[in-house]
Amino acid sequence: MDQHKEYQLWMQQLPAVGERRIKKLLSRFGSEREAYERLKTTGEQTAGELLSGILNKEQAECVRMFTRKWQLKENYERLREQEISFLTEGDGAYPERLRQMETPPYGLYVKGKLPEGERAWAAVIGARECSSYGSFLAQAFGRRLGEAGVVTVSGMARGVDGTAQWAALEGGGKTVGVLGSGVDVCYPASNRKLYERILKGGGALVSLAPPGTPPAKSLFPRRNQIVAGLSDALLVIEARQRSGTFITVDMALEQGKNVYAVPGRITDRLSDGCNMLLRQGAGIALSPEDFLAEVSLLYGRNSFEGEGRREKNRGKRNEKKRDGRAEGEQTGEAADITDEGEKRVLSLLDVTPKSLDELLAELEGQGQELGLSELTSKLILLCLRGEAVQIGGNYGIRQK
C-alpha cells in the first residue's frame, strides 16, 4: 500500500498536471507506477510523444525532468516523518463529501485527524476585517455548532473564519481548517495559536498543496472549493458586496449546497453582501439555533445537541424537578443565563422597548459600569438566546 502511495504522491506533485490531466495519464498508462517507470527512463523526444495530447512539448519536458529528479521513497518517508497523511479517493479516510464533487481532488494532505462518525459539517465564512458585531456573531454561531457536535469548516483566515473556529473549539467541538498553503505552513502567521489548537483539539488541517508550499493567490480558489465541498451547509457572517467570500458561495451553489446568511443593517457596508444573498434567496440565519435547525434538516437528524450540552441540560431539568417546578415552568429569569452582566441587562428590559441611551442611564443610576459596546454585545446575545427582541434601535423583553 505504501509503495502505491509513493507513486501517487509523485503524480499529485507533477508540474502543470491537475485532476483532469491525471485522469488522462492514468487512462493512457494504466497506473501511476507504469507512468513513473516510463517517464523516468525516457528521453526528451520520447517524453513529448508519450504525453502528446495531454501536455505540450515544454510541459512534457518539465514533467520528464521532474520525474528524473524525484526521490520516490525518500519523499514519501519525509511526509510520514512530518506526520502528514496523503489521502486519495481509494483511502477509507478520504472525505466522502469530496467524493461527491464533480472533480474530486486526486490527493489531499492532512495534518491532524479528520473527524469521524456520523456528524454534520458546516462552513462558516465572512469578512477578514469584520466588525465587533461580526466577531460577536462568529463566536456565538461557532460555539453553538461546537456544542452541538457539528464540525466547523473554514479557511482559518483572520476575522470571521478564525473566530468561528476558535469558538467551535471552546464549545467542545472539532474544526477543520482548509489552507491555501502547505499544511505545515501557518497562514496567516497571526493564527499560529489557532493552528496549534486545532491539532490539539482533535481536528485537522487540510490542503491540496504539498508541504512547504507558501500561500499564493492561485491556491485560494481551489481552497475555497474544498471548504464548500466538505460542508453540508455554508453560513456567511458579514461580507462586502464584492469580496472573496462570494467565490466560496458560488462554489457551494455549484455543488448544490445550501447557503445561509446573517442579516445586517442596510447602512453597514460589511452587511451588503449578506443582505444581497438574502434578497437572492439564501436562507436566513437569525440565531445559532435557527441555523442549527436548518443543518439538522439537511443532514437528516432531529437534534444536534452535543453530549456535553445534553448532560448539562439533563442536570438542569433534574434540578427543576427537585425544586418542585414543572419542566418548562417560567421563573421570571432565564435559567440558562449565568453571566451576571446579562442578567442585569435583562432585568432592565420591559415589554415596552428601550433605547440604548435609556438602558445606559438606568445602569448608571444603579451604579453599574457598562460601556456602550459591552451593553450592545450583551443585548445581541440576549436576542440570540431568545430572551430579548430588537425593534429598530430599541430593545425589549421577548414575551413568551
Image (cartoon, rainbow, N blue to C red):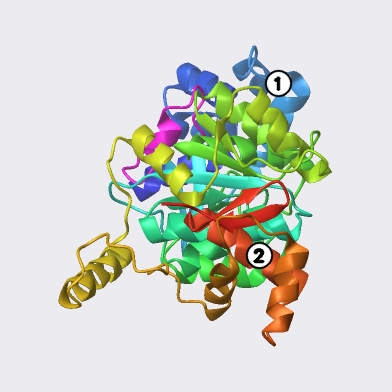
> Of the residues shown, which amino acid type is indicated by label 2?
Ser
Please tell me which residue lies in front, 162 or 59.
Answer: 162
- Picture coordinates of residue 319 (x, y %)? 22, 76
Which residue is tagged 2? 377
Which residue is tagged 1? 45
- The answer to whether residue 137 is above or below residue 250 is below
Locate residue 239 relative to residue 75 in the image: left or right: right
Please tell me which residue lies in front, 392 or 290.
Answer: 392
Q: Secondary structure at mark 1?
A: helix
What residue lies at 28% left-to-right and 46% top-to-bottom? 118
- Picture coordinates of residue 164 (x, y %)? 58, 57
Residue 53 belongs to magenta span: no
> Of the residues shown, which amino acid type is indicated by label 1?
Gln
- The answer to whether residue 200 is above or below residue 80 is below
Please tell me which residue lies in front, 358 or 311.
Answer: 358
- The span from disc 1 to disc 2 (Cα, nearest Å) is 68 Å
Q: Residues within 10 Å of mark 1 (few under 14, many from 20)?
A: few
Please tell me which residue lies in front, 186 or 260.
Answer: 260
Task: Tell me, yes or no, if residue 194 can be seen here.
Answer: yes
In the image, the segment drawn in magenta is 90-105
Q: Which residue extends farthest top?
A: 53
